Amino acid sequence: MRLLATLARRYGTPLYVYDAAVVRDRYRALRGAFTRPVLVCYALKANSSRAVASVLAREGAGADIVSGGELVRARAAKFTPSRIVFSGVGKTEEEMAAGLRAGVKAFNVESSEELDALARVAGRLKKPAPVSIRLNPDINARTHPHITTGRAENKFGVETGEALALYRRASRDRRLRVMGVQCHIGSQITSLAPYRRAAAAVAALAKGLKASGIPLAFADMGGGLGISYKDEMPLDPKALVGTLEKAFADQPELELLVEPGRYLVADAGLLLTTVLYRKQTSKRRFVIVDGAMTDLPRPALYNAWHPVEVVSPRRGKKTMADVVGPVCESGDFLARQRPLPPLERGDLLAVLKAGAYGFAMSSQYNSRPRAAEVLVDGGKARLARRRETHADLTRGEL
Ligand code: LLP
């Protein structure tokens, strides 16, 4: 906690602080749980800051990217291109070309028209494109509706019948190379059952394809491992890996891939924010802080619950308070109805478990410069991204 006060003084707030050791521990725990060849592809969208991503690249992780921008970031963080998978429902031909030129491991293709586009790009570049089809197994991951992706009413992937047709087409097209199958059913998943069902569907598809002369090299089970924000029981990586390995036990030739984002980085990050004002209405105690929905949009977007801790709590009775930001929206809150001790202007609060989908989803709404980021590693803290300035706000405007 003393370190946090020092960092706040040195770099100002709102400030993201990440702990590299936590990221490494998470990666090793998951990677180490597998007993057969696996590639853990970090879903860069969770936190694409180079300082954090390069911790994972140095561990030997692969990357899961969803845009040309993430390809640039993955390369800047020094992920090996042959360990990068390119996901996303709307890749442009330019993005496909960039991925193909870089030499990514596979494109996770999500529609028939996308497969055509990829073949065209590969033909143009005279370089066969590695393909894996994203299966939509119509499974309910039982998570927040905004982050479930594997139902037939979601825009992601293709249903089994269409997947088979796409594999047949791809296997006959010399511009394409069939490599694998991918499936991602949602995020913040805290039970094994949906994974078990999804893995069974993927394994059955792979087996059927092999029987019809289209053997695959890998099966990618996506990300989604949930963590404990409040009182959820997080998924045990060993249990998840056991479930996956069991589903593919009779196909030992398949390399397994997973694409975790949140699991690797959420617990490694916190958002430090300073109390600006206190305010009491007839109904509520408000603590107005300098961090906002622009810095950490998860509470506003999903009503997500993040733990809030006072860095140097004062003695006194705790009372319920809403922790809100300066943005002009009633939805701009970081926490609601939390028992907090007495606070003074200038006190520091830490919003925990903010390493995933925090800074990565931040915005400049209300013309607020984005926060700075600090990486703590081996007892040393270093500025990983400088705070944006007002000049950054108008950069690019003509
Ligand atoms: N692979 C694919 C294809 C994905 O779409 C995602 C996340 C992942 C992997 C990583 O999922 P994870 O392991 O992090 O659950 N902004 C939301 C989460 C959106 C997740 C989108 N896709 C949040 O803050 O909860």
Image (spheres, helix red, strand yellow):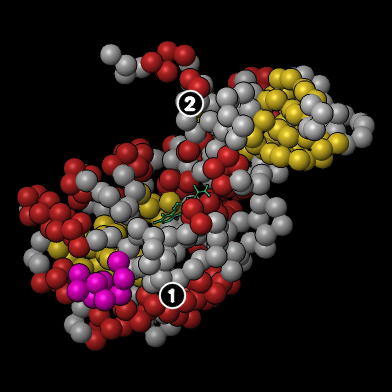
Badge number at residue 136: none
Quarter in which the N terminus is drawn: top right
Residue 38 screen position, x and y as percent? 42, 66
Which amino acid, by three-letter code, is at mark 1? Answer: Ala
Q: Is residue 95 left or right of residue 66?
A: left
Separation of marks 1 and 2 at Cα, in angstroms: 40 Å
161 falls in the magenta region: yes
Q: Is residue 244 left or right of residue 163?
A: right
169 falls in the magenta region: no
Badge number at residue 365: 2
Residue at 34% across, 75% down: 254
Instruction: Give, as a single range, the part of the protein colored magenta.
Output: 158-166
Residue 389 screen position, x and y as percent? 48, 16
**Residue at mark 1:** 199
Residue at 66% across, 51% down: 229
Pick the residue in front: 137 or 85.
137
Q: Residues within 10 Å of mark 2 (few under 14, many from 20)?
A: some
